[in-house]
Image (cartoon, rainbow, N blue to C red):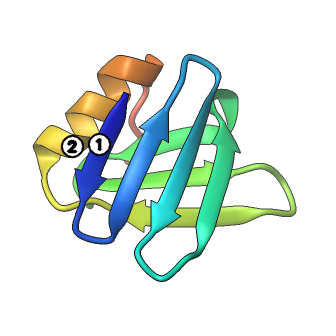
Amino acid sequence: MVIDFSGGKMILSPFDLQVRLNHGVQLYAMVEDLKCHDEAIMLIADAGAVRWHLTLDNVQQLQQVKAELGLDDPIA
């Protein structure tokens, strides 16, 4: 599944997420390393030494990501 957002696009598979930002930067994370912050509309990748976060445009995008990847446990 591909989700476009103002900063680029997210490419979701059952096992991982790729984020291709508009300026050529690419981010990658395995599904088990992803969490959602619902109030901030933010997707967070934490794989130990490598951490990044992505603020999405709207709640619908975050809901699509959560549904596709099975991310049901938000962080407060």
| Viewer-nearest of discs 1 and 2 | 1
- Left/right placement of residue 30 relative to residue 49 reads left
Give the residue furthest to the bottom. 23
Asked if marks 1 and 2 touch (Cβ < 8 Å), the reply is yes
Q: Where 19 falls versus 22 (above or below)?
A: above
Q: Where 56 falls versus 59 (above or below)?
A: below
Q: Where 62 falls versus 58 (above or below)?
A: above
Residue 26 spot, x, y in % from top left: 61, 64
Mark seen at residue 56: none
Residue under label 2, please give it: 61
Q: Dividing the image into 4 quarters, which one contains the N terminus?
A: top left
Give the Cα separation between the discs numbered 1 and 2. 7 Å
Q: Which numbered disc flags the more N-terminal residue, 1 or 2?
A: 1
Choose top left, top right, bottom left or bottom right for residue 15.
top right
Give the residue furthest to the right. 49
Q: Where 13 falls versus 38 (above or below)?
A: above
Residue 47 spot, x, y in % from top left: 78, 49
Choose top left, top right, bottom left or bottom right for residue 60.
top left
- Left/right placement of residue 58 relative to residue 76 reads left
- Callout 2 crowding tier (Cα within 10 Å): few <14, some 14–19, many ≥20: some
Residue 57 spot, x, y in % from top left: 18, 61
**In the image, what residue type sits under mark 1?**
Ile
- Please say whether residue 72 is visible from this viewpoint: no
Residue under label 1, please give it: 3
- Callout 1 crowding tier (Cα within 10 Å): few <14, some 14–19, many ≥20: some
Q: Secondary structure at mark 2?
A: helix
Depth check, front residue: 11 or 37? 11
**In the image, what residue type sits under mark 2?**
Gln
Q: Residue at x 66, y 51 (%)?
A: 28
Residue 71 spot, x, y in % from top left: 44, 25
Q: Secondary structure at mark 1?
A: strand
Q: Residue at x 67, y 28 (%)?
A: 32
